[in-house]
Image (tube, rainbow, N blue to C red):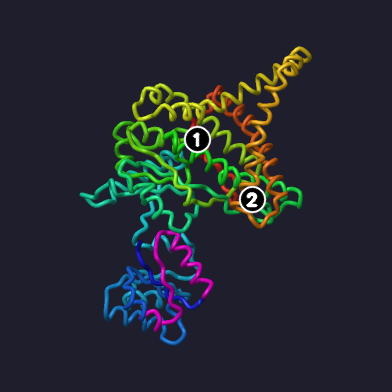
Amino acid sequence: MTRLLVVEDDPDLSLALRVLLTRGGHDVSLAADGREALRLLFAERPALMVLDLVRPGLDGWEVLDRTRDMSDLPVLVLSGLGELDDRVRGLRSGADDYLVKPFAQAELLARDPLVHPVRRHRPDARVGKGAALNAAYDALGAHLPAGTDRSRVVVCVVDADGHLSPGAPALVSGPEGFGDPDTGGVQIGVRMRNVDDARPLPHRGRTANAYARLLIRMQDAEFAVSNTAMQLQRRRTGSVGLGGNGQFTRLSALDRIAAAERRPWQRDALLEDYELGLHMRLAGYGVTHVHDAWVSQEALPHTRRFLTQRTRWAQGNIACVRHTGRLVSSRHYGARGVPESLYTFFQPIAHLATLLLTAVVLVAGGSAAEVVLAAWPLALALGLASVVPFVLAGPVYRREFAADRSRIKGLLWGLALWLYAYHLFLVSARGFVRLVRGRTGWAKTRRNAETAGVGPVATES
């Protein structure tokens, strides 16, 4: 981890810079004045100094002069002095770069010598996440020095709104993750960062915001409890799935997949990340889950965007059925991993079958009702099996992640989670209809702050 020194007397800006740069993978020390900056410069030997020029006491110009007298440490100047003469003076005084306040986060990160943005323009841009990840993979390969041990390079995929939990890289590199040389991929947990947002829809009324808060809470409970429990079970069956956010992979494993499949991520796949995990396991690598680390993202408060996202996931699961033959015949999948993976593939189809069976019962009327009544013990058992796990998940979620809420609220969350799960039947039907109509293109869900764009945003294969 690279150590950076931030010299800034504004406590709010100083803290914001620390959060931003720490999130970028750096160890950040703060100095509020020039003398403290020089002391830390000697004591900690940082790799880069971010320096505010206008400072009380020993000003930034003098700090820059003294720094240049004793070292060639890279210095990025932050200053509200934006005139041409000020910028020229800063660069001539030894600054390596000069950034005028106010500035955008992306602009600061672009000046980080360890950050190498990969830009793509149409027609190559906006043709799918798989294509974007493959472009980044190619750019990384071109950037790494010759002779790099690619088995010791870890690639992390985080969404634009994703924030890694503290220490996440260290945890996934430990004995449970890439400390095992046979591990090719690690997936961490996912949490919803806006779960406590009182007004997720600031321009809507009280009722709309109450619904949005519940929808956000259900997504958080789903990932924090249901998905984590599923991934822990998959660790036992050897079938952990990779997700689109918080995904870590060993570069040499991506190389092996690229050699076999022409590219690591499938270009037009709807679940390119999950399919990457399948290919990784088929290539002989292990994939595991580290639940002590997580990535936070924004939950979707809009029903339409939420259903669009989940329809894509359901359709992607159905598309994975094509891998059944390879999976069943692979020596890298065990007797427990095959059924679990097939369950994932065929889950949307099972939902469709349930919908059709329900329709038959309703159309058949009395005769079907008589059959259900005759087999009431079985019907009751199936009903309890479908309800109880969700109801129990609510109190577990409250205890682990919302202990300040009442037990009654935890129970209500469990009931809501049971009702929330019925969206799977709707999105499975929508996904199947899209598949039948040949609409198999990629479409990434818009984030909460995004508005609808103009022009093509996805590919239709």
Badge 1 density bin: few <14, some 14–19, many ≥20, Cα 10 Å: many
Across and down, in percent, residue 259 comes to 29, 34
Task: For marks 2 and 1, give the CA distance.
Answer: 36 Å
Q: Which residues are magenta?
A: 11-38
Which circle marks residue 398 in the picture?
2
Asked whether 63 or 237 is in front, the reply is 237
Residue 1 visible in image: yes
177 is higher (above) or lower (below) than 312: below
View extreme (right): residue = 366
Q: Is residue 402 above or below residue 426?
A: below
Taking the image as drawn, is residue 267 in sight?
no
Q: Amino acid at mark 1?
A: Trp
Residue lying at 39% horizontally and 55% vertically, measured from the top left: 170
Tell me residue 62's x, y (percent): 36, 84
Which residue matches tag 1?
442
The local secondary structure at tag 2 comes to helix
Horizontal side, residue 203 vs residue 83: left or right: right
Q: Quadrant of residue 365?
A: top right
Q: Toward which corner of the image does residue 124 lie, by quadrant? A: top left
Q: Secondary structure at mark 1?
A: loop
Membership of 36 in magenta stretch: yes
Q: Residue 427: where, in percent of width, then height?
A: 61, 31
Q: Nearer the viewer, mark 2 or mark 1?
A: 2
Point out the tag, 2 or 1, that comes first from the N-terminus: 2
Image quadrant where one finds the N terminus: bottom left
**Frontmost residue, 121 versus 342:** 342
Q: Which mark is residue 34?
A: none
Q: Which residue lies at the image location 41% right of the left edge and 71% below the top edge?
A: 29
Q: In this view of the protein, which residue sits in the foreground, 260 or 109? A: 260
Q: Are the two marked residues, 2 and 1, in contact with CB atoms closer than 8 angstroms? A: no
Residue kind at label 2, given as amino acid type: Arg
